[in-house]
């Protein structure tokens, strides 16, 4: 009974609703406009939950300032160690700018210490189809190759 309860609690997740940006709703894009959707899956390392979420919150705090961002959402296990993100971008250049932003770069720099089993997947889809379901995101992530932080000789 205790094992079943622990397994169930570990799988309980909080999902923030997909937040569309002003650009997505007022940017003049048609629902058929092709956009880039990136999903990620990460686990915090043992004993690093607080530091992992500190980095995550720092990145989320910058999202509204990201040029070309059309929307985003986060999901995480309440008692487990898994977290997921979903972002939608008007183009690859906007995504690249975000990846190079100070908060994101700092989170990536610290990821060897705070995170493990990192995976990314991306897909183009029509703006009108947003958001991708978490089930679809997880299916794509399950097929993705684990990320290795090569700048620090990282671990998958």
Image: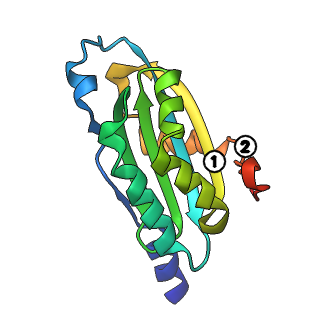
Q: Specify whether 61 is left or right of 101.
A: left
**What kind of colouring is applied to the model shown?**
rainbow
Q: In this view, does 99 lie above or below 16?
A: above
Secondary structure found at label 1? strand
The residue shown at (53%, 23%) is 92
The residue shown at (56%, 32%) is 122
Q: Kindly identify which residue carries mark 1.
A: 119
Q: Is residue 56 above or below residue 12?
A: above
Q: Specify whether 69 is left or right of 97.
A: left
Nearer to me, 3 or 154: 154
Nearer to me, 93 or 16: 93
Q: Residue 150, position in %: x, y? A: 76, 48
In three-dimensional space, the C-alpha distance between marks 2 and 1, rounded to whole angstroms, equals 6 Å
Residue 131 seen in the current view: yes
Q: Residue 33, position in %: x, y? A: 38, 12
User: Crowdedness of circle 2 by 10 Å Cα count: few (<14), some, many (20+)?
Assistant: few
Q: Specify whether 73 is left or right of 38.
A: left
Q: Which residue lies furthest to the right in this view?
A: 153
The residue shown at (32%, 21%) is 128
Q: Which residue lies furthest to the bottom in this view?
A: 2
The residue shown at (46%, 21%) is 125
Proximity of marks 2 and 1: CB atoms separated by less than 8 Å: yes
Q: Residue 82, position in %: x, y? A: 53, 62
User: Crowdedness of circle 1 by 10 Å Cα count: few (<14), some, many (20+)?
Assistant: many
Secondary structure found at label 2? loop
Nearer to me, 50 or 77: 50
| Label of residue 92 in the image | none
Residue 1 seen in the current view: no
Q: In which quarter of the image is residue 132?
A: top left
Q: Kindly identify which residue carries mark 2.
A: 145
């Amino acid at each position: 009974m205790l094992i079943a309860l622990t397994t169930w609690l570990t799988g309980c997740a909080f999902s923030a609703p997909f937040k569309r940006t002003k650009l997505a709703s007022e940017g003049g894009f048609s629902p058929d406009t092709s956009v880039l959707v990136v999903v990620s899956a990460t686990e915090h390392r043992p004993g690093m939950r607080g530091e992992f979420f500190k980095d995550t919150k720092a990145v989320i705090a910058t999202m509204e300032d990201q040029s070309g961002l059309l929307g985003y959402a986060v999901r995480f296990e309440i008692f487990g160690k898994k977290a997921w993100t979903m972002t939608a971008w008007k183009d690859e250049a906007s995504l690249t700018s975000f990846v190079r932003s100070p908060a994101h770069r700092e989170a990536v720099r610290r990821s060897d210490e705070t995170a493990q089993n990192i995976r990314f997947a991306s897909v183009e889809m029509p703006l009108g189809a947003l958001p991708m379901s978490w089930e679809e995101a997880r299916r794509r992530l399950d097929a993705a190759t684990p990320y290795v932080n090569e700048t620090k000789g990282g671990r998958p």
